Amino acid sequence: MERRQDRAAQTVPEGGGEDRLSALDATFLELEQADEGATMHIGGIMVFDPLPGGGTPTLEAIRSTIAGRLARLPRYSQRLSSERTGGLSWPSWRADRRFDVRNHIWHAAVPAPGGEAELCEWAGEFFSHRLDRTRPLWEMVLVEGLADGRWAIASKTHHALVDGVGSVGVVQLLLDLDRDGSHDPDEPLDGPDAPWEVAPPAESGLLAGALGTVARATGSTLHAALHPRAALERSLALAEVLAANEISGSPPTTLNVPIGATRSFRVVRVSLADVKAAGRELGGSVNDVLLSACTAGLRELMLSRGERPPLTGLRAMVPMNVRDAGEHLALGNRVSSLFVELPVAAEAAVERFEAVARRTRRLKASRAALGAETMLDVAALAPPVLHSLIARSLYATRLFNLTITNVPGPRVPLYCQGATLHAVYPLVPLAAEHAVGIAIFSYMDEVAIGISADRDSCPDVDVLAAGIREELAGVPGA
């Protein structure tokens, strides 16, 4: 990977007072500290068509565009006050007076023929490396050499800085709604013409992010103390979560073994219209169709290893968005989670779909999300010196076998330097002893499923990708 050191404008946005991390934000730092194999950055690959006049933008042009707009995101020029968590207080975000955009955006090229396979191979290497905690926690790369004259911007941002839904807002801020770049990125895009198909809170249980928000922990506890009925509701919800997830536990599998930090990355793409049509015909949601396809791929992976799929199913942590509409560009983490049993033992596709649909409907109607949030609210009250132990327990394999996220993206084309955004391939982090993670992102009329895997313990990741692809090819309407 080539890092070019040509001169470019150095940008340090004004302001930048300290802003302390929440307990959840710090959790993602703690997970990396606890295991050398954990990589807690989110990100993806944005693939663009050639510029209107042909070719690829220069590195200088990309740096200049992003540097100018990062003034609206001060966190992206701030670094941690301490590189490690622990002690008596959480680290804060502090203005980095040495911030230079050249340290965060550089250039690379993929080998010929520059197809999806070559791009994914390069992406696996890029996503394998942790972010430097002595600098603001993000990186971008201008990637050239793609087939048909296309180019890409690869990005990774630490999960302590932003969650999945928040990163969508950041992408919106960095790209344009018009080919000529005349759109004001500060202009709110809410309302009937908004390009983002973000579900309302009551229906967002299978949509985005990582594990539950705890920023309101003290306020939640005070509210419960002053409102006995609310306290009872939260207590019952917590008891249900503990009974379902702690007592029964997720099954032991070959997906949950010690992992290294080297990643493989694969992508499966499918028409969103086909997925929606399948959901309507089968009597379920888009999420049900996609979760069923992931279930099929995981089943094929286990069978290919000679592993008997557990009758209780694999347990997936499926995060949910709890971000208010007014927090569209807010950084930090605003998410909670549900745990879904994926019926990998079911042989027939329709049987898998019906089981997934039943389970997601039951979870949405239950107190599971409130219970997960309550569990983390309580955990957030622990002092930083003890919180690391709790953080590791919340990401232990006894709770879930893998993470599957689904972030809804824009339904209108976006642009960079006048070039049309062609596709987006998403990435989900891997915690310790979780060898596989699946991220789903929809843009325009396409759904991209990004598969991140530990290269050493999951060298057969192509079996998983092929199983997902085959299941989606067989759904009604596809």
Image (tube, helix red, strand yellow):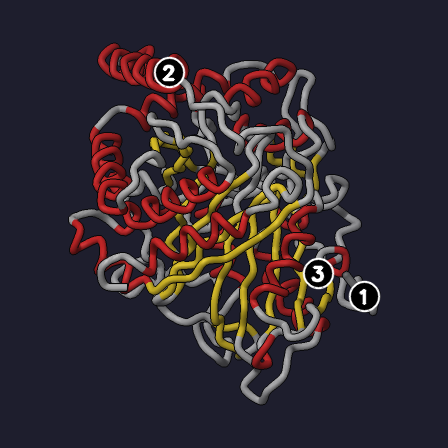
Disc nearer the start of the sequence (2/1): 1
Give above or below for 140 relative to 432. Answer: below
Q: State which quarter of the image contains the N terminus.
A: bottom right
Measured in 3D between alpha carbons, the distance from the residue under mark 2 to the one under mark 1, in whole angstroms, is 52 Å
In the rendered image, which residue does mark 1 sit on? 4
- Residue furthest toward the bottom? 53
Which residue shows up at 42% across the image and 51% down it? 467
Task: Tell me which amino acid carries mark 1.
Answer: Arg
Disc nearer the start of the sequence (2/3): 3
Q: For this view, does 290 lie left or right of residue 440?
A: left
Element under disc 2: loop
- Asked whether the beta carbons under mark 1 and mark 3 sit within 8 Å of each other, the answer is no
Element under disc 1: loop
- Residue furthest toward the front? 306
Measured in 3D between alpha carbons, the distance from the residue under mark 1 to the one under mark 3, in whole angstroms, is 9 Å
Q: For this view, does 15 lie left or right of residue 396?
A: right
